[in-house]
Image (cartoon, grey):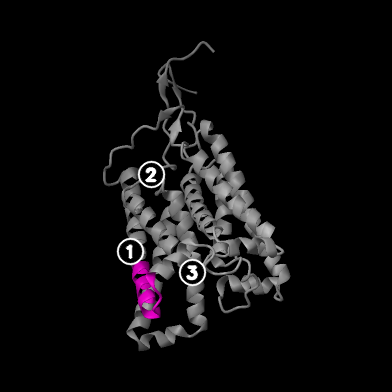
Amino acid sequence: MVMQDGGTVDVRPGPDPARAAPEHSGAYLATGLCLGLYGGALLAWTVYGITQSSGTAWDFVEGLFNPGASPATAEVLGPYEWSFTVAFLTVAGLSLAQRRVARSAALLCAFLLLAVSLREGIGLLHAAYRDQYSNDPLGSWALATRGLCLLTALVVLTVLFPATEQRGGRPLPPPAGRTPDSPEARWRRLSRICGVLFLITAVVRIGWTVRNLTSSGMSTDSYLRGVVDGSIPGTLDLSATGEFTTVVSILAFLVLGVIAFRGRRDIRGALLAFAAVELYLTVRTVVWLAVTDFFNLSSQTSEGALSMATTAYALAAMTSVVVLATGRGFGPYDGVRTPLGPRLPTSE
């Protein structure tokens, strides 16, 4: 308390704007436990792959960034799963810490896990694919992991969707005026920049996907079957196929790009999580291009030069989104607290 002209001014800080409302603590706790458990399961598969391979732990570390290195866990998980394992565990930690920024990231993870589960469910409609779970020595463990994937997706979506940003059962007050220098205006500018970068990346990826389809001669039906049917690879594999990861990433870029461009205040966590994953995958691609000397050969053809340009754009765009989404000026959870205002002194 501070005395001022015989009155009392309450200068105690209000609730931490970066923390979830107390009534949503259970939802964040359940989210953190489920994502942490599933991330731990993927981590266990990774460790198993390292122990069963002929390579060493250093070979695995090198393979994280160099696709040409010895693939210590290529038969179990791939780079897409490695990156999302880190994302799941990070979002789980933020959820257990009751950080509101984890909500959109957790919902993104849940939608991705639901897509994986639906694809696997379609694959299980084929008897030959179901038999692989019975005949493979690790089939029961793989099936348990798939079941945990679906359970995690359903729990996170169920508990987090109602956990809207409210305090004490009442909606948060509307944002302050959007003057050019206000935090709200700065946040909207940064959000729209991230949205534009994501939408451009989606368009570029669509273009390359169409180009690869036409040049390879693969039919669109066969490609789409590889996206939605988990039995198409013909093997019991926990790693996602290239068709699935490509289409899912395009959809994620489009959806998150539109939401960010519209200036939604709760999208920061999802932007940061997905951009970080895509940045890792892009860096891995750049390392592969450097190892194969593609940098020197790309200038000889127009397609190679275009590939280099789009890769450079992807690297710059994802780095920019990570930096912008990490900055304190981006999200709605870093506002300045204000005093509650003057009030009459009490008898205490």
- Residue beneath disc 3: 242
Give percent across and percent down for residue 219.
39, 73
In the image, what residue type sits under mark 3?
Answer: Gly
* Residue 323 visible in the displayed image: yes
Residue 233 in the figure: left or right of residue 37: left
- Where is residue 55? Give x, y as percent: 70, 75
The answer to which quarter of the image holds residue 298 is bottom left
Q: Which residue is mark 2?
A: 265
Tag 2: amino acid: Arg
Q: Residue at x 60, y 55 (%)?
A: 146
Determine whether the residue tagged by mark 1 lies in a helix, strand or loop. helix
342 shown above or below 95: above
x 64%, y 64%: residue: 132
| Label 3, label 1: how far apart the Cα atoms are | 21 Å
**Which residue is drawn at the image coordinates 49% and 70% (left, top)?**
283
Asked if one can make out residue 309 in the rendered structure from this viewpoint, the answer is no
> Magenta region's main secondary structure?
helix
The disc, 3 or 1, on the residue closer to the chain's N-terminal end is 1
In space, the residues marked 3 and 2 are separated at their CA atoms by 32 Å
Q: Callout 3: few (<14), some (14-19), or many (20+) C-alpha neighbours within 10 Å?
A: few
Quarter-wise, where is residue 264 in the image?
top left
